[in-house]
Image (cartoon, rainbow, N blue to C red):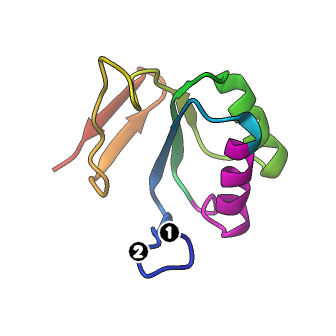
Amino acid sequence: MIGTEWELETKNSILFFEEVDEKLYKVDRCLSQWFLAGKFRKIKGLILGNFRGLKTSNIFAIIKEMIKVTFPVVYCPYLGHTKNKITLPVGAKVKLNTYNKSLMLEK
């Protein structure tokens, strides 16, 4: 949706990504588009969900090649298209605590 009226504003947000059965080069291309559009600038955190068929470490390596990671990055295998998934409401205010590995919805 980059370049459309539905483009997401990512400033001060916590992003989450997941993908299902996609080739690594296609995920790389998607992340490159987000990077080139400035979507990683001024984010507060990044959650990597389930990338069924890929290693999450490879996804993080792609991100580290593109940008200097200055925000917390966490992995949660229960985000995405999995049997026992966690639903994250888009646009909700949350608090990410990497020390105790929690993500809390705020009122």
Q: Which residue is mark 1?
A: 1
Residue 76 seen anywhere in this rendered image of the structure: yes
Residue 69 seen anywhere in this rendered image of the structure: no
Q: Is residue 81 magenta?
A: no
Q: Is residue 99 above or below residue 3?
A: above
Magenta stretch bounds: 26-42
CB under 8 Å between callouts 1 and 2?
yes
Amino acid type of the residue that numbered disc 2 sits on in the rendered structure? Trp
Judge the density around disc 2: few (<14), some (14-19), many (≥20) Cα neighbours within 10 Å.
few
Q: Secondary structure at mark 1?
A: loop
Q: Position of residue 43 (x, y in %)?
A: 55, 56
Q: Is residue 28 magenta?
A: yes
Q: Which mark is residue 6?
A: 2
Taking depth in this image into account, of 27 and 38 the one nearest to the observer is 27
Q: Main secondary structure of the magenta part?
A: helix
At x 49%, y 63%, the residue is: 10
At x 45%, y 68%, the residue is: 8
Q: Position of residue 39 (x, y in %)?
A: 60, 63
Amino acid type of the residue that numbered disc 1 sits on in the rendered structure? Met
Q: Position of residue 25 (x, y in %)?
A: 77, 41
